[in-house]
Image (spheres, rainbow, N blue to C red):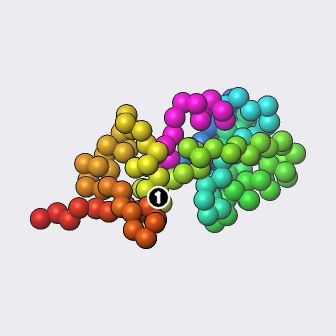
């Protein structure tokens, strides 16, 4: 957070931050964020985090990427008097923090998804048990 905030203080242009584990990211989702009329566009992650944030004036914002960062970022924006658009995006809100998250990549990744192809190369596939979809990994011999 300190390094980000120091960097923000030097910027005179908008900044877009995206977490590196957003495996379903695509250009349309990014365009949706960048086209906001608000001062800040934010995408919550599951569990209270912030998966993506677009800040038009980063000198008047402070990052806080620990704990319930989504709520923290909303509070920071309010303290600076900034308007916020919360972007409802399945592709941007789906991260891969847990093994169960891989299910979404295998289902929604599409034929050209490098993330999906990589998971399949590692031996991951969909598994349906008791009506629930999950992931299974082939054991290596």
**Range covered by the magenta-colored residues:** 21-33
Q: Based on the displayed image, in which of its 4 quarters is residue 35 positioned?
A: top right
Disc 1 packing (10 Å; few <14; some 14–19; many ≥20): some
Q: Quadrant of residue 84?
A: top right
Horizontal and vertical percent position of residue 41: 72, 41
Front residue (pair 127, 70): 127
Q: In this view of the protein, can residue 20 be seen by the observer?
A: no
> Quick one: quadrant of the C terminus?
bottom left
Question: Hey, which residue is sitting farthest front in the picture?
Answer: 131
User: Relative to residue 35, is residue 108 drawn left or right?
Assistant: left
- The residue under label 1 is 101
The image shows residue 6 at horizontal and vertical percentages of 64, 46
Left/right of residue 113 with respect to residue 40 in the rendered view: left
Write the residue at 54% across / 51% down: 94
Task: State the image coordinates of residue 114 (x, y, percent, origin top left).
Answer: 36, 39
> Which residue is found at the position 47% from the left and 58% from the top?
101
């Amino acid at each position: 957070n300190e390094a980000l905030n120091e960097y923000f203080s030097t910027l005179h242009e908008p900044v877009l931050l995206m977490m590196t584990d957003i495996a379903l990211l695509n250009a349309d989702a990014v365009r949706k964020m960048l086209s906001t009329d608000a001062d800040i566009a934010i995408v919550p992650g599951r569990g209270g985090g912030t998966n993506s944030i677009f800040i038009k004036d980063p000198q008047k914002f402070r990052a806080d990427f620990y704990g319930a960062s989504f709520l923290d970022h909303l509070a920071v924006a309010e303290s600076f008097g900034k308007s916020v658009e919360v972007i409802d995006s399945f592709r941007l809100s789906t991260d891969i923090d847990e093994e169960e998250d891989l299910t979404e990549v295998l289902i929604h990744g599409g034929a050209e998804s490098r993330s999906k192809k990589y998971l399949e190369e590692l031996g991951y596939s969909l598994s349906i048990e008791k009506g629930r979809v999950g992931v299974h990994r082939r054991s290596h011999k």
